[in-house]
């Protein structure tokens, strides 16, 4: 497995000359929906889809509730989620209040599993040219709503 990238010509508008530079950007695949996540977890764990959906939904509720209370949430070796704020610096202590906050966010600190993934993952340049969304005509699988290119790690 590898992370594909492409080279994109980009104009930077922060100077008068509108300088054009080449930037390397990751090529991302499709969004993995909640249903697809649950289906893949079912296949790996052998649990019923309704059970998986209920457990993952419960996990999300617990995470949001605890973040709302200001707690950090550790998800094993995956990483830690913690609530955060973006604020404007103020000249006086009195001015440093809730009005100085301009964005609420969730910070993510990758855990050992993701750090190892990033350390070991290969980087490859994506093929240039037009990407086709046409299905492979030699495939006999048809459109069965399959796994979307998912590879079973237990196989």
Image: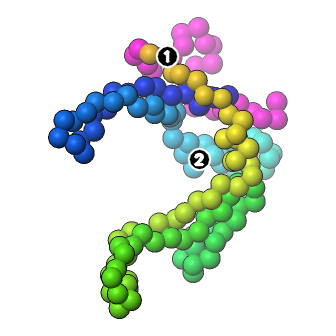
The residue at the point 49 percent across, 34 percent down is 26
Q: Is residue 44 magenta?
A: no
Q: Nearer the viewer, residue 43 or 109?
A: 109
Q: Secondary structure at mark 2?
A: helix
Q: Answer left or right for 92 relative to 111.
A: left
Q: Which residues are magenta?
A: 129-155
Q: Answer left or right for 127 relative to 109.
A: left
How dense is the environment of label 2, judged by Cα within 10 Å: few (below 14), some, or many (20 and up)? few
Cα–Cα span, label 1 and label 2? 30 Å
Q: Is residue 52 visible?
A: no
The residue at the point 71 percent across, 30 percent down is 151
Q: Could you tell me how many numbered marks the image carries?
A: 2
Q: Nearer the viewer, mark 1 or mark 2?
A: 1
How dense is the environment of label 1, judged by Cα within 10 Å: few (below 14), some, or many (20 and up)? few
Q: Position of residue 116 (x, y in %)?
A: 73, 44
Residue sitting at the far left: 16
Q: Nearer the viewer, residue 90 or 146?
A: 90
Residue, disc 1: 127
Judge whether 137 appears above or below 113 on screen: above
Q: Image quadrant of residue 124?
A: top right
**Predominant SS of the magenta segment:** loop
Q: Image quadrant of residue 19?
A: top left
Residue, disc 2: 35
Q: Quadrant of the C terminus?
A: top right
Q: Nearer the viewer, residue 108 or 38?
A: 108
Q: Is residue 154 magenta?
A: yes
Q: Position of residue 102 (x, y in %)?
A: 35, 71
The scheme the figure's colours follow is: rainbow
Q: Quadrant of the N terminus?
A: top right
User: Which numbered marker is on residue 28?
Assistant: none
The residue at the point 66 percent across, 29 percent down is 122
Q: Secondary structure at mark 1?
A: loop
């Amino acid at each position: 497995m590898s992370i594909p990238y492409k080279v994109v010509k980009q104009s930077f508008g922060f100077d008068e000359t509108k300088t054009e530079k080449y930037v390397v950007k990751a090529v991302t695949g499709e969004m993995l929906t909640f249903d697809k996540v649950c289906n893949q977890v079912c296949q790996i764990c052998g649990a019923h889809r309704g059970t998986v959906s209920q457990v993952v939904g419960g996990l999300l509720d617990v995470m949001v509730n605890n973040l709302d209370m200001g707690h950090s949430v550790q998800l094993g070796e995956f990483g830690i989620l913690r609530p955060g704020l973006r604020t404007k610096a103020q000249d006086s202590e009195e001015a440093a209040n809730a009005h100085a906050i301009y964005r609420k966010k969730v910070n993510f600190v990758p855990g050992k599993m993701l750090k190892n993934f990033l350390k070991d993952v290969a980087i490859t340049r994506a093929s240039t040219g037009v990407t086709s969304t046409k299905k492979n005509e030699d495939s006999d699988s048809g459109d069965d709503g399959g796994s979307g290119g998912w590879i079973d790690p237990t196989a």
